[in-house]
Amino acid sequence: MRILVTGSTGYIGGRLVPRLLAAGHEVTCLARHPEKLDGLPWRDEVAVARGDALDPASLREACAGHDAAYYLVHSMAAGKAFADDDRAAAEHFAGAAAGAGLRRIVYLGGLGPDDERLSPHLASRHEVGRVLAAGEVPVTEVRAAVIIGSGSLSFEMLRYLTEVLPVMVAPRWVRTRCQPIAVGDVLDILVQCVDGGDDEDRVIEVGGPDVLTYTEMMRVYAEEAGLRRRWIVPVPLLTPRLSSLWVGLVTPLPPKVARPLVRSLRHEVVVGGAEGARLGVTPYREAVRRALEALPAGTETRWSDAESIPAHPGPADPEWSGGTVYEDERVIPTEALPRHMFWACTRIGGDVGYYGMSWAWRVRGVMDQLVGGVGLRRGRRHPEHLRSGEAVDFWRVDRIVPNQMLRLHAEMRLPGEAWLEWRIIPTGDGSDLVQIARFQPRGLLGRLYWYGMAPFHSMIFPRMAARMAAAAEERGYACGE
């Protein structure tokens, strides 16, 4: 089919497109800023239309020539008027779809009861479904609750609250029941819905196999993330506004988006007895585990990887997706050729040490051994040659590309995950050395560890990069290059 995907730069849209391509469909992505799609693994496989859901003319042009469309637009980031914008956008799209003769619209909405007064966010999600269905094109409205996957707004809020707060004084909504669903299951259902086979509108409620309270969801997350048990004390005093301010203090989520989301958490969002109800196959615990099995920061992914692991962070996800990652980056311009710079990088550890402040590294090794770690006693196999997967002191070679990059993954005892990476960028008369230290903290202790070590990092990392670059230049001079 020829399919138009709106919201292709968003969380679901960016993961749906490769699924549709893999199913053999021709895909056009509608985007206000098409440049945001540049660099995505599947960019060359799709057509791109510039347009805005609030601009009827651009919608009519984009819809022309297509068989079906996915409507994945929402305006929560617009602030208080988001419901008005969502209503207008849905009206415009319904008209454009009818004019282009589309056979079906698939819309991803929010799970929630129709028979009670909903929060502004959920009420708007339901209203958009009604507005689309009032048009001439048949609509399949897929209603989901919390989607579990790295980058999902609801999941990221859960992640940050659980990791940062060992003890949480929480509002009553932590006792509300929810039916979370894995992002991979949502994508499978959306792909199946595009061919409706008839001219009827339908509402499909979807959820995972587990019904949990938010308290239970946080505790399972803590277990899968390797955190200590979280203590959650519900109190009746936190209003939705106070709750949203509280969320803003401990998470990096945009307040304009987090506030309406928090107000929706008081509603029980469980799949009802509707005829079209669909359940995903991935248990909540497994969905969390997949979301936490994210690739190391900076790892390149292929199009096939992005399609098969939607629970991992994606290249178009917001900057707050994937949990907190701290970085210390140093760039050193040098006259050394890439092969000499690579030689200097691969000598790290063992008898050579870490290019300065060797006493500090020895102290760190002893500290690691005292808490049951491997320390520096493993050394390295060869003084200059490295291969993927081998040990270097309390590191392991995570990735190595000759004359281009080396990345080490820490195996010392840490409240988080750490990497040391060197990239070599060729220049006209030498190369630039890019050194990046990354740390993904685990819980509050991990964050305190990073800031506690910051004074030492400010001395160690600049010296390491500078002396490594100097060693490469000296080797080049010795070789007459």
Image (cartoon, rainbow, N blue to C red):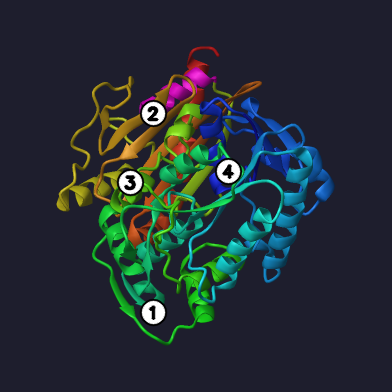
Indicate which label's residue lies in the foreground, 4 or 2.
Answer: 4
Indicate which label's residue lies in the foreground, 3 or 2.
Answer: 3
- The residue under the point 29% across, 52% down is 285
Nearest to N terminus: mark 4 or mark 2: 4
- The residue under the point 72% across, 50% down is 94
The x, y position of residue 132, in whole percent, is 67, 54
For label 4, the crowd category at 10 Å Cα-Cα, with few meaning under 14, some 14 to 19 and many 20 or more, is some
Give the SS element for disc 1.
helix
Location of residue 245 with respect to 28 vertically, above or below: below
Q: Which numbered marker is on residue 282?
A: 3
Q: Which numbered marker is on residue 172?
A: 1
Quadrant in the rendering for residue 481: top right
Residue under circle 2? 399
Q: Disc 2 residue type? A: Arg
Quadrant in the rendering for residue 117: bottom right
Nearest to N terminus: mark 3 or mark 2: 3
The x, y position of residue 474, in whole percent, is 48, 23
- Principal SS element in the magenta part? helix
Report how far apart the C-alphas of labels 3 and 2 lie in the structure. Answer: 31 Å
